[in-house]
């Protein structure tokens, strides 16, 4: 099967995956669907999580804003952990004329967009936490199935290249979302509505482009205890490399978000910028990281395919994140955050470009790809939460300057874990 469902295997023989023999050309249309679909969920998420959510927390309770962000992060991690496994497993088991992934990413987009509106309307801390958790639940109905499209529709020889396309949407979403969010610091509610509208487009647009093949011809599974264990639990057989990848990714992502999760407060409370100065630097930092990430996304994935190695680009990128993160520790100057953005942004761009290709190649079982990739994505979600939670503690005990060595150490340990993966070159 090529990128469109009419070519290649028929519905009766579709096995839910591709190999180097069956796929003669790179599935470019699937890649485009991943670029747009990923940007449209990641951009709004980052615009809210990094900019508008801390800003709203500061409005609701300015004296406890750091603690509120930590609680929001912790509760989001718990909800995302459960939702990733459930929606990933359900999409693996789904049999419909629209395929396995499409129904979930479309419904997830609609409900996540509605949830963002609820977040914007939250009048107090409790309602903010509840509505944010609801949003996290439905957001992961998009995330887990959409990542699984990489495993479903891409042969191993093209995974570096198509993962680069996924990473392009991911990177533009991360940094572009923060830039969009920063534009609405003076009008937070409008920012939420704009980002909710973008979220609403994510699933439908990706579904129309990728035109997923019907899964009705795939074997159905009776819901037995064995099925439940296989599809709704963490893998145990032949999964050593899988867990090395999971915890390596967890620490590398935590390194990035221990800084980016408090970017607004670093600039205002530590580097003493006013609101307009902070908005200027958030936008500039996001632009630098976006540009470097896009450049490395275009380069790193195809190089990974060319040299037939996933580990080397991931390890090098982790070292760059560590170096970039350490620099602002030595100079309390917002311009050093630009240097951080250029170096760490280069590292994260290369990392994101190859990371999902590495993840697919350490999967223990292709039949539970969405669930297992969803669990691996917990390292992404968990890192985004663990980094800010640990950072919040260090801010209280030591001060903002402690965030930078924390990020460097996390990234270095993550790189070491990737080194020990055996299955992947």
Image: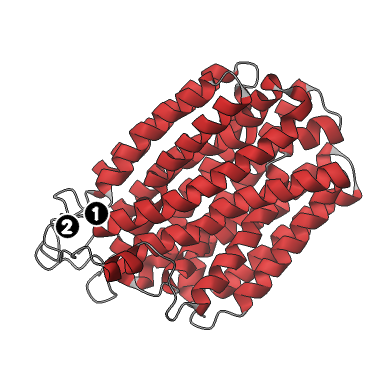
Image position of 147 (left or right of 297):
left
Give residue 255's quadrant in the image. Answer: bottom right
Q: Looking at the rendered structure, which numbered label has been put on residue 215?
A: 2
Element at label 2: loop
Q: Looking at the rendered structure, which numbered label has been put on residue 34?
A: none
How far across and down, in percent of the image, does residue 79 sit? 49, 45
Image position of 220 (left or right of 115):
left
Between 41 and 110, the one lying in front of the other is 110
How far across and down, in percent of the image, does residue 368 sit? 33, 66
In this rendering, does residue 209 appear at all?
no
Residue, x 49% and y 42% (percent of image)? Answer: 42
Element at label 1: loop
- Relative vertical location of residue 24 with respect to residue 210 in this rendering, above or below: below
How far across and down, in percent of the image, does residue 115 sit? 44, 29
Disc 2 and disc 1 in contact, CB within 8 angstroms: yes
- Relative vertical location of residue 307 with respect to residue 262 in this rendering, above or below: below
User: How far apart, in angstroms, are the residues tagged by discs 2 and 1?
Assistant: 6 Å
In this rendering, does residue 257 appear at all?
yes
> Would you name the residue on which mark 1 appears?
100
- Relative vertical location of residue 27 with respect to residue 337 in this rendering, above or below: below
| Crowd class of label 2 (few under 14; some 14 to 19; many from 20; radius 10 Å) | many
Q: Earlier in the sequence, mark 2 or mark 1?
A: 1
Give residue 74's quadrant in the image. Answer: top right
- The type of colouring in the image is secondary structure
Give residue 66's quadrant in the image. Answer: top right
Residue, x 26% and y 47% (percent of image)? Answer: 102
Residue positioned most to the front: 225
């Amino acid at each position: 099967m090529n990128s469109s469902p009419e070519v290649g295997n028929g519905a009766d023989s579709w096995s839910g995956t591709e190999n180097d023999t069956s796929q003669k050309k790179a599935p470019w249309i699937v890649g485009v669907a991943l670029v747009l679909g990923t940007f449209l969920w990641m951009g709004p998420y980052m615009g809210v999580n990094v900019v508008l959510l801390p800003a709203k927390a500061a409005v609701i309770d300015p004296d406890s804003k750091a603690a509120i962000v930590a609680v929001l992060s912790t509760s989001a991690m718990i909800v995302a952990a459960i939702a990733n496994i459930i929606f990933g497993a359900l999409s693996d088991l789904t049999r419909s004329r629209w395929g396995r992934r499409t129904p979930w990413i479309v419904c997830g987009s609609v409900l996540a967009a509605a949830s963002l509106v609820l977040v914007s309307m939250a009048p107090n801390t409790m309602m903010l936490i509840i509505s944010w958790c609801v949003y996290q639940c439905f957001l992961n109905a998009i995330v887990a199935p959409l990542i699984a499209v990489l495993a479903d529709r891409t042969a191993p020889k093209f995974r570096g290249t198509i993962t680069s396309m996924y990473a392009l949407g991911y990177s533009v979403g991360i940094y572009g979302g923060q830039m969009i969010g920063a534009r609405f610091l003076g009008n937070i509610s409008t920012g939420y509505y704009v980002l909710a509208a973008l979220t609403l487009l994510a699933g439908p647009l990706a579904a129309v482009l990728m035109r997923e093949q019907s899964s009705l011809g795939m074997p159905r599974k009776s819901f037995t205890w064995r099925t439940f264990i296989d599809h709704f639990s963490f893998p145990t057989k032949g999964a050593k490399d899988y867990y090395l990848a999971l915890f390596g990714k967890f620490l590398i992502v935590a390194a990035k978000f221990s800084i980016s999760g408090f970017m607004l407060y670093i600039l205002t409370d530590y580097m003493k910028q006013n609101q307009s100065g902070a908005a200027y630097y958030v936008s500039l930092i996001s632009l630098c990281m976006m540009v470097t990430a896009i450049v490395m996304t275009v380069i790193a994935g195809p190089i990974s395919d060319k040299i037939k190695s996933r580990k080397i680009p991931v390890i090098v990128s982790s070292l760059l994140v560590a170096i970039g993160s350490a620099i602002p520790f030595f100079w309390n100057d917002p311009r050093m955050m630009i240097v951080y953005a250029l170096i760490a942004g280069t590292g994260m761009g290369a990392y994101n470009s190859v990371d999902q290709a590495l993840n697919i190649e350490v999967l223990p079982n292709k039949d539970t790809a969405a669930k297992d990739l969803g669990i691996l994505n917990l390292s992404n979600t968990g890192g985004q939460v663990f980094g800010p939670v640990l950072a919040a503690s260090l801010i209280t005990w030591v001060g903002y300057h402690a965030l930078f060595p924390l990020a460097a150490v996390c990234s270095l340990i993550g790189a070491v874990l990737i080194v020990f993966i055996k299955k992947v070159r």
